[in-house]
Amino acid sequence: MRDSEARERFAAARVARLGTAGADGVPHLVPVTFALSGDEIVFAVDHKPKRSTDLKRLRNITANPAVTFLVDAYDEDWTTLWWVRADGHATIHAESASAVAALCAKYAQYRERPPEGPVVRTEIHTWRHWAAS
């Protein structure tokens, strides 16, 4: 898979897995909705139910801004398997109109109810990818 195709597949994915680690180095993995804008990935805390507003992913980013995102496709036909990973440096913002606009453009649910929580912007420094064929 070419780099440009990997980025296209990543951008088109409906969900990514966000990997963070706190100051203690313990990994934490959660699914996130996101938008890709250039070499930046954005996501926001939205209205979907959560146990708490004190989210582990945000605490981890505050302690250790190194993050990774993974999107992939699995199929019983292993010749169609692929994954794309983006590693970067995340920052938390109280708001970001451009990030929310990018999320609303991608997800109809956000057009109906835009995210109102903190926005995380991640500057990507490394792209990795693999495809079976």
Image: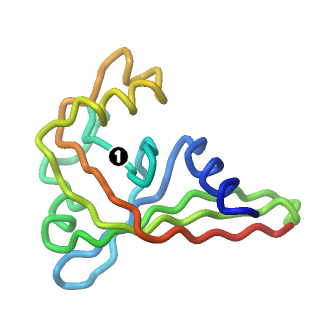
Seen at 41% across and 48% down, the residue is 32
Relative horizontal placement of residue 114, taking residue 37 as reference (left or right): left
Q: Is residue 31 above or below residue 22?
A: above
Q: Position of residue 107 (x, y in %)?
A: 47, 27
Q: Is residue 128 above or below residue 82?
A: below
Q: For numbered disc 1, what is the local secondary structure?
A: strand
Seen at 34% across and 59% down, the residue is 123
Q: Position of residue 21 (x, y in %)?
A: 28, 75
Seen at 88% across and 65% down, the residue is 79
Relative horizontal placement of residue 119, taking residue 107 as reference (left or right): left
Which of the 4 image quadrants contains residue 13? top right
Which of the 4 image quadrants contains residue 122? bottom left
Q: Amino acid at mark 1?
A: Val
Seen at 28% across and 51% down, the residue is 121
- In the image, 55 versus 125, the foreground residue is 125
Badge 1 is on which residue?
42
